[in-house]
Amino acid sequence: MYAIVDIAGKQFKVAKDQYIYAPKMEGEAGSSVSFDKVLLVDNGGSVEVGAPTVNGVKVSGKILEHVKGNKVIIFKKKRRKGYAVKNGHRQQFTKVQIESIG
């Protein structure tokens, strides 16, 4: 059984006992969260597609920790102008364990 869930504008395919790295959300480590925007549910071959969401289905999970992603380097340069800028960025994520679908 799996579901496709919209979390903060991004779509994730989730299954029970799976870990996902979602965009940073409010809540302490160990607290539970539930996601209402379920777009699709597959229960053993029977697929239910929402228009736009599936009614009566929730995905619940538990926040494990808040982490940072890998560093992304941004380098800008204009040739023959003496202009070069180097920046780095690390995106904030929340590690969530999916507990139940339904």
Image (cartoon, rainbow, N blue to C red):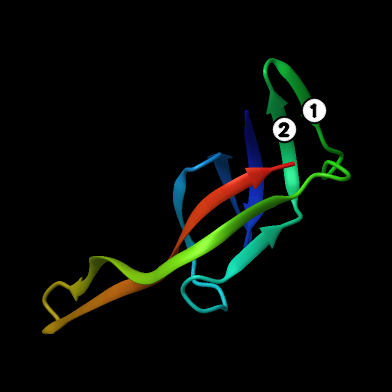
Question: Measured from the top left, where is residue 41 in percent x and y?
Answer: 72, 32
Question: Measured from the top left, where is residue 38 in percent x and y?
Answer: 74, 46
> Is there a contact, CB below 8 Å, between mark 1 and mark 2?
yes
In front of the other: 7 or 72: 7
In front of the other: 37 or 60: 60
Q: Which residue is drawn at 23% across and 68% down?
A: 71
Q: What residue type is labelled 1?
A: Glu
Q: Which mark is residue 48?
A: 1
Quarter of the image for residue 62 reads: bottom right
Q: Residue at x 30, y 73 (%)?
A: 90
Q: In this view, does 45 lie above or below 17?
A: above
Q: Which mark is residue 13?
A: none
Q: In which quarter of the image is the N terminus?
A: top right
Question: Measured from the top left, where is residue 98 in percent x and y?
Answer: 55, 49
Q: Which amino acid does label 2 sit on?
A: Val
Q: How crowded is mark 1: few (under 14 residues within 10 Å), some or many (20 or more)?
A: some
- At numbered mark 2, what does the secondary structure look like: helix, strand or loop? strand
Residue highlighted by disc 2: 41
Q: In this view, does 82 lie above or below 58?
A: below
Q: In this view, does 97 lie above or below 25?
A: above
